[in-house]
Amino acid sequence: MEYQRARLQYQFNKLRPIREGVYPQYGGNTEFELFSFFEICYHLKDWVKYSPEYSSLSNIEKFIENSPALRICADICNRLKHCKLTKKPRSKSELGIFQLKSTTTIFPYPGGALESLDEAKIVTERGEECCFTLASECMAEWERYFKESGV
């Protein structure tokens, strides 16, 4: 289970350089990294539910239902996994897809190009919001869950 929490933190740590426009110069796909974060973030609940050492923790499904950020995270994960939400959404709206805007700077030397991300948004039950802000809120919610559960 600690590995899964570390995996989520690792994926979250990748978002900062993406937001700052540093990550793309090392190769990478912003949409893929955002999706990976929300997928890992939502599926942490399965590790809580099915890990023997966490079997005494409170109802994780109820926690997610009561957390707007994790409800939205669940719908992002399921929307991208299935191309559309195949079950009743957890959040109160049909989600859009990631809306990414970037700027490419071309330098006058071979291989001299840098793509920087200007914005990454998604439409949720709360309106249009920044993907990075939502990711930070999801991380805070997981910390709250584990703290309240005494882990």
Image (tube, rainbow, N blue to C red):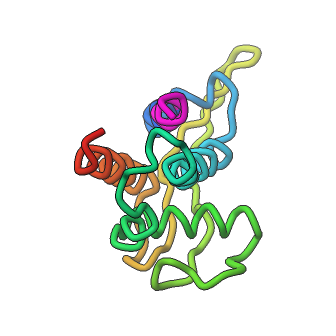
* Left or right: where 30 falls relative to 151: right
Residue beneath the point at 62% across and 67% down:
97
Is residue 102 something one can see in this rendering? Answer: no
Is residue 148 something one can see in this rendering? Answer: yes
Q: Which residues are magenta?
A: 1-10
The part of the image, by quadrant, that contains residue 126 is bottom left
Magenta stretch encompasses residue 9: yes
Magenta stretch encompasses residue 63: no
Number of marks: 0
Residue 54, position as x, y percentages in the image: 44, 44
Residue beneath the point at 47% across and 68% down:
72
Residue 130, position as x, y percentages in the image: 41, 58
Above or below, comparing residue 132 to residue 71 in the picture? above
Q: Nearer the viewer, residue 16 or 62?
A: 62
Residue 69, position as x, y percentages in the image: 39, 63
The part of the image, by quadrant, that contains residue 87 is bottom right
Residue beneath the point at 39% across and 53% down:
138
Q: Nearer the viewer, residue 39 or 44?
A: 44
What secondary structure is the magenta-colored segment mainly? Answer: helix
Above or below, comparing residue 27 to residue 101 in the picture? above
Residue 98, position as x, y percentages in the image: 59, 61
